[in-house]
Image (cartoon, rainbow, N blue to C red):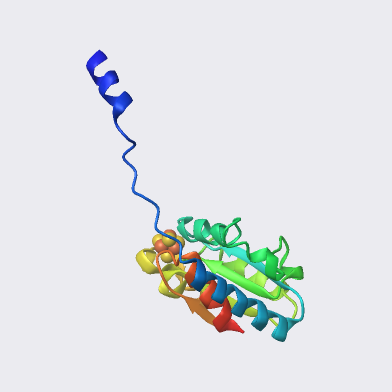
Amino acid sequence: MRKLLFRNLFLTPLTEPSPEPDGESIAALATGVDIAARRRLGHSLSIRLVDAGSCNGCELEIHAVNNAYYDLERFGIRFVASPRHADVLLVTGPVTKNMQEALARSYDAIPAPKWVVAVGDCAFDGGCFAGSYAVAGGVAAVVPVDLYIRGCPPSPTDLLKGLLALF
Ligand code: SF4
């Protein structure tokens, strides 16, 4: 036991190094999103996120878009708590039968014009949960989708590219 403790004192943690961020391409993407969002919607864009049954992997990447490095809010793009204040409905996960009605109600509550962005492979067609008795299908099975951002999960850069494509 003492030998094990002593050895562990000098071992480095067994974690992978984090990927090198591509600062230039993220800055270019962010500028593109900023210009496009302002042209289309004035000075702000509000996003309502609905987790329709995700494993939470997609949410972690969406949270990263809000962190100090990507800092989406500096462009006036922000997440809101109510669909009544939103322009965009961002949906993650396969749509579980329990969330089907809540998703449809959130969509109905967003004032027009509105857009729906389905994030992740599960939101596309149910992904690895497709065919489950508890899953209604991809997001398009419940509400009309304007844009898919594929990936399992998509990276913050993919999310920025997707938002740029939306405008
Ligand atoms: S796409 Fe992948 S990360 Fe996102 S909810 Fe599905 S399994 Fe989870």
What residue is drawn where x is 41% and y is 59%?
20
Q: Left of 155 or right of it: where is 40?
A: right
Asked if 7 appears above or below 55 in the picture, the reply is above
Asked if 8 appears above or below 101 in the picture, the reply is above
Which quadrant is the N terminus positioned in? top left
Q: Left of 140 or right of it: where is 4?
A: left
Q: Left of 133 or right of it: where is 156?
A: right
Residue 124 image position (x, y, % from top left): 44, 75
What residue is drawn where x is 70% and y is 85%?
40
Residue 9 visible here: yes
What residue is drawn where x is 55% and y is 83%?
165
Total marks shown come to 0
Q: Nearer the viewer, residue 123 or 98?
A: 123
Residue 94 image position (x, y, % from top left): 46, 66
- Quadrant of ligand 1: it is bottom left
Q: Left of 47 or right of it: where is 136?
A: left
What residue is drawn where x is 65% and y is 83%?
36
Residue 1 visible here: no
Q: Nearer the viewer, residue 125 or 56?
A: 56
Q: Quadrant of residue 90?
A: bottom right
Which quadrant is the C terminus positioned in? bottom right
Residue 106 image position (x, y, % from top left): 67, 69
Asked if 137 appears above or below 41 in the picture, the reply is above
Residue 138 image position (x, y, % from top left): 46, 73
Q: Nearer the viewer, residue 24 or 38?
A: 24
